[in-house]
């Protein structure tokens, strides 16, 4: 099968059967109390909301009957076209459709008798007034018309459009700006100011020519873009003295509190300076005490709906007015609509939606239940940047400033990381479909994986220049699998080597002015993963590379995850070749293979860690020398464990038997690992040597009474503790957990051979 056909087949498989539909991480740091739905009444208690009681009505002066009772909200359909599922939110414009008010008759139309014709707004207003008058006979019901407008375009909206949503969500949104624009609590752009002016002109004609009732109350989010929008929309209108523009800033009408800086409000002093005619609700704090972006925590949907229930209860119980304007945000209005039992209706910047709301007192006491209000959000800054390895190399940031195809892959990595965090929270690998709460996240993962596959197929199908070779995107494809599944990685690796052969092989690669991006990483992973794969399950695409070719590639980059000296990496590659050939030889490996094995073992023994450390210093002299000695011992023990037994014993004639050789080499490696553990708080550089020590500690059940059995168990405990910590490391991939699982099964089994532990291909 050709490389192109391989990836087109994978694409076909993904699109035909493996689509499982993302939810937020389930990690809880704070709890709110909220009983959602029709049964709901809500009191939300969130850590850090110590001013909440100031916002929650203490005495329900305007609706005393609601005291101690639940309030149920429903949007009353049949009055605005936005209620109709046939209305498309993406193309709907309030200004072109009279705010969506439906042309219809009302029972109260009869009361006009022979008066002059009334407008649709006037007749609707009379009907709403009638509904509330009727409610006076039933004090358990109230009606209000909530007209909710989204702010005009802010500089954060413009930045997201410029950088693209993937790069915005994963990187730029956590910054205050880019040196040209500021989007921390951003102001309106010229387009946003124009959208506010459009709303101003619209309301002017509705009030003066169409008889739309003037608003009785105005509320605004405390964020600057909403305050500017409300000012631009209403401040210059000629309003009656009885119904002035006297806006109140309410904290809980703010946007969903993500870790984005655009959701972090300015302090009260600043807000007062830009909007002196606005008043603040009681209890409004000087500083923003709700936003938790600096802690890497964002508000959950349940938490937002809970606070929305609080603010609606506040408005309906403390504000006797019927016609109410709310200037807020897309996410907040969407959440309010959900609490009001309205259909989903997304708003573009500057758009407006009215809702006739019926509030009913439910004759039951307030109850509570626990929900998660804030949860960690996985982005580059919160999960990746703090944990990138700095032991042996500096950090080069991803090219977030560049727009292009790389964004597709980056989103795959971020989503894969979120899936991985869920796996770590449950301490197991979650396959698609196993956890319903992750269905949407999986769907997004597959969507972007499909985009990445289409990109690869496009590049493979073209005659490309060396600069556009597909090595890096194919490496990314393997990385995506190891983040979320750990199933297809070897297929991707084999396909990559097949692709390299199709474009001219290793000779062509080495003829380029510089090695393709990530090619050295490919060789590191291919050689290392072959060690943790069975002899008959190897990736063989590089087995024919010469020592000179391997050295050229491996010398070009050092892996901080496995800083193995090049000479020893080459020895590992040759060991895999010997293992592969030995597994293909019946009944026993021939003399030629024994000669080859002894040659590899001789090269390992001839390696000089001190000489290597002098020529290849990194981090520090002591660390470089420690790594040289550590990997020398680990590679030697690995070869002892995996090479044909006769060749191994021939290479070490002074050893009485194989078991004593294995034991002495294991003790040497153990001492160096313990030295490494004393040097580093934690380092992935110890990972592969730990695997070797873990397999070397495998002991049969019959050996329980032997003297070194307890020592073997201690090694197993050490390796288990290391890999458990490595698994919980924020940016480690699924291969770590798979290796840990195989080692644990191997130890329990009483088996002792390498391929009895790694009986199937396992990435490392």
Image (spheres, rainbow, N blue to C red):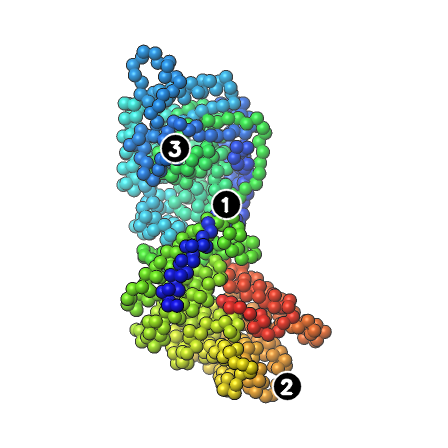
Q: Nearer the viewer, mark 1 or mark 3?
A: 3
Q: In front: 517, or 286?
A: 517
**Going 60% across and 76% down the picture, which residue do you hit?**
666
Check disc 2 and report its element: helix, strand or loop: loop
Density class for disc 2 (Cα within 10 Å; few <14, some 14-19, many ≥20) is few
The residue singled out by tag 3 in the image is 84
Q: Quadrant of the N terminus?
A: bottom left
Tell me the quarter of the picture where residue 205 sits: top left
Q: Residue furthest right?
A: 705
Q: Which of the 4 image quadrants contains residue 326?
A: top left
Residue in the image at 32% along x and 36% along y: 92
Secondary element under disc 1, as helix, strand or loop, is strand
Q: Is residue 161 above or below residue 480?
A: above
Residue bearing mark 1: 374
Q: Which residue is mark 2?
A: 656
Sequence-earlier tag: 2 or 1:
1
Where is residue 151? Give x, y as percent: 35, 37
Residue 405 against residue 237 in the figure, above or below: below
Q: Secondary structure at mark 3?
A: loop
Residue 222 is tagged as none
Disc 2/disc 1 C-alpha distance (Å): 63 Å
Above or below 750: residue 100: above
Q: Earlier in the sequence, mark 1 or mark 3?
A: 3
The residue lying toward the viewer, choosing from 639 and 693, is 639
Distance, label 1 to label 3, CA atoms, is 33 Å
């Amino acid at each position: 099968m050709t490389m192109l056909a391989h990836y087109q087949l994978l694409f076909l498989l993904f699109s035909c059967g493996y689509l499982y539909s993302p939810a937020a991480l389930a990690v809880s740091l704070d709890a709110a109390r909220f009983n959602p739905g029709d049964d709901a009444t809500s009191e939300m208690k969130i850590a850090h909301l110590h001013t909440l009681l100031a916002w929650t009505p203490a005495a329900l002066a305007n609706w005393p009957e609601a005291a101690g009772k639940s309030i149920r909200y429903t949007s009353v359909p049949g009055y605005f076209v936005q209620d109709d599922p046939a209305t498309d939110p993406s193309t709907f414009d309030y200004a072109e459709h009279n705010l969506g008010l439906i042309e219809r008759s009302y029972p109260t139309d009869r009361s006009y008798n022979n008066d002059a014709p009334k407008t649709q707004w006037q007749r609707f207003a009379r009907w709403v007034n009638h509904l509330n008058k009727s409610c006076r006979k039933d004090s358990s019901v109230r009606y209000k018309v909530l007209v909710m407008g989204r702010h005009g375009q802010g500089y954060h909206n413009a930045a997201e459009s410029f950088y693209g949503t993937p790069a915005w969500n994963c990187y730029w949104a956590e910054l205050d700006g880019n040196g040209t624009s500021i989007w921390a609590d951003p102001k309106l752009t010229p387009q946003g100011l124009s959208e506010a002016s459009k709303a101003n002109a619209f309301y002017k004609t509705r009030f003066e020519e169409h008889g739309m009732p003037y608003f009785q109350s105005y509320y605004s989010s405390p964020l600057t873009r909403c305050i500017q929008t409300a000012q631009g929309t209403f401040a210059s209108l000629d309003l009656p003295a009885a119904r002035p523009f006297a806006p109140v800033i309410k904290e809980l009408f703010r946007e969903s509190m993500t870790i984005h800086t655009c959701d972090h409000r300015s302090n009260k002093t600043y807000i007062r300076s830009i909007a002196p005619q606005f008043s603040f609700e009681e209890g409004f704090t000087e500083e923003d005490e709700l936003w938790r972006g600096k802690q890497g925590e964002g508000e959950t949907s349940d938490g937002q709906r809970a606070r929305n229930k609080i603010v609606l209860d506040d408005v309906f119980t403390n504000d006797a007015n019927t016609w109410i304007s709310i200037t807020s945000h897309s996410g907040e209005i969407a959440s309010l609509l959900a609490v009001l039992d309205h259909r989903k209706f997304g708003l573009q910047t500057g758009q407006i939606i009215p809702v006739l709301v019926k509030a009913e007192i439910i004759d039951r006491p307030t109850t509570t239940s626990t929900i998660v209000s804030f949860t960690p959000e996985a982005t580059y800054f919160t999960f990746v940047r703090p944990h990138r390895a700095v032991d042996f190399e500096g950090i080069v940031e991803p090219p977030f400033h560049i727009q292009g195809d790389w964004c597709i892959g980056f989103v795959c990595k971020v989503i894969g990381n979120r899936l991985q965090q869920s796996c770590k929270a449950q301490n197991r690998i979650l396959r698609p479909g196993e956890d319903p709460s992750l269905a949407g996240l999986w769907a997004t993962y597959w969507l972007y994986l499909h985009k990445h596959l289409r990109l690869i197929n496009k590049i493979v199908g073209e005659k490309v220049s060396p600069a556009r070779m597909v090595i890096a995107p194919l490496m990314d494809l393997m990385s995506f699998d190891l983040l979320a599944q750990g199933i297809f990685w070897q297929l991707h690796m084999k396909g990559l080597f097949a692709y390299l052969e199709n474009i001219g092989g290793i000779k062509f690669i080495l003829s380029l002015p510089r090695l393709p991006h990530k090619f050295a990483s490919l060789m590191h992973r291919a050689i290392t993963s072959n060690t943790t794969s069975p002899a008959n399950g190897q990736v063989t695409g590089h087995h024919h590379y010469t020592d000179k070719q391997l050295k050229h590639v491996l010398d070009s980059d050092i892996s901080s995850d496995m800083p193995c000296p090049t000479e020893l990496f080459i020895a590992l590659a040759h060991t895999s070749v010997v293992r592969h050939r030995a597994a293909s030889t019946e009944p026993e490996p021939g003399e030629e293979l024994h000669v080859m094995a002894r040659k590899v073992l001789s090269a390992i023994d001839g390696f000089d860690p001190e000489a290597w450390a002098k020529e290849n210093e990194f981090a520090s002299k002591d660390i470089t020398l420690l790594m040289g000695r550590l990997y020398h011992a680990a590679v030697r023990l690995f070869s002892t464990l995996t090479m044909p037994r006769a060749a191994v014993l021939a290479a070490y004639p002074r050893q009485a038997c194989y078991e004593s050789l294995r034991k002495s080499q294991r003790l040497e490696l153990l001492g160096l690992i313990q030295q490494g553990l004393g040097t580093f708080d934690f380092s992935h550089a110890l990972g592969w040597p730990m695997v070797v020590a873990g397999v070397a500690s495998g002991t049969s059940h019959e050996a329980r009474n032997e003297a070194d059995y307890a020592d073997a168990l201690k090694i197993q405990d050490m390796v288990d503790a290391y890999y458990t910590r490595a698994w919980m490391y924020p940016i480690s991939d699924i291969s770590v957990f798979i290796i840990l699982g195989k080692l644990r099964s191997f130890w329990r089994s009483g088996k002792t051979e390498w391929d009895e532990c790694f009986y199937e291909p396992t990435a490392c």
